[in-house]
Image: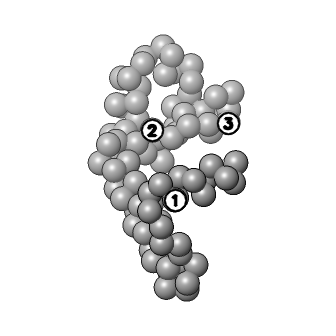
Amino acid sequence: MGTITANELKIRGVASIDAAMKGQEEVTISVRGRERYVVMDMESYNRLRTYELEAALYQARREIAAGQGIEESVDDHLLRLQSTE
């Protein structure tokens, strides 16, 4: 994974990201020598989001199978959420 300094990004802008992304799926941006941010192309981001949503769906299905789910209407759900605040 490549790295861009915050100063380079400030000076060269998006061109520095384009150059660093050549042949890479993600690039880190370092600020004062510490990696702080990750930049990735939209295809990689969308793939990551898909994995996250699939993991959440898998977890929800496991909880329902274990009897930990609650079946209720939208109105009842909102009331339950409001009562826990």
Q: Are marks 2 and 1 in contact (CB under 8 Å)?
A: no
Q: Residues within 10 Å of mark 1 (few under 14, many from 20)?
A: few
Look at discs 2 and 1 and give the one toward the viewer: 1
Amino acid marked by disc 1: Asp
Q: Point out the tag, 2 or 3, that comes first from the N-terminus.
A: 3
Q: Residue 46's x, y, as percent?
A: 33, 50
Q: Which mark is residue 39?
A: 2
**x 40%, y 54%: residue:** 49
Look at discs 3 and 1 and give the one toward the viewer: 1
How many circles with numbers are drawn on the protein?
A: 3
Q: Residue 18's x, y, as percent?
A: 34, 31
- On the image, numbered disc 3 is attached to which residue? 34
Q: How crowded is mark 2: few (under 14 residues within 10 Å), some or many (20 or more)?
A: some
- On the image, numbered disc 1 is attached to which residue? 76
Q: Point out the tag, 2 or 1, that comes first from the N-terminus.
A: 2
Residue 10 showing in the rendered view: yes
Q: Is mark 3 on a helix, strand or loop?
A: strand
From mark 2 to mark 1, how far is it between C-alphas? Answer: 41 Å
Q: Point out the tag, 3 or 1, that comes first from the N-terminus.
A: 3
Q: Residue 68's x, y, as percent?
A: 58, 78
Q: In this view, does 18 lie above or below 1?
A: above
Q: What element carries label 1?
A: helix
Amino acid marked by disc 3: Arg
Amino acid marked by disc 2: Val
* Observer-nearest of 30 and 55: 55
* Observer-nearest of 80 and 69: 80
**x 67%, y 36%: residue:** 34
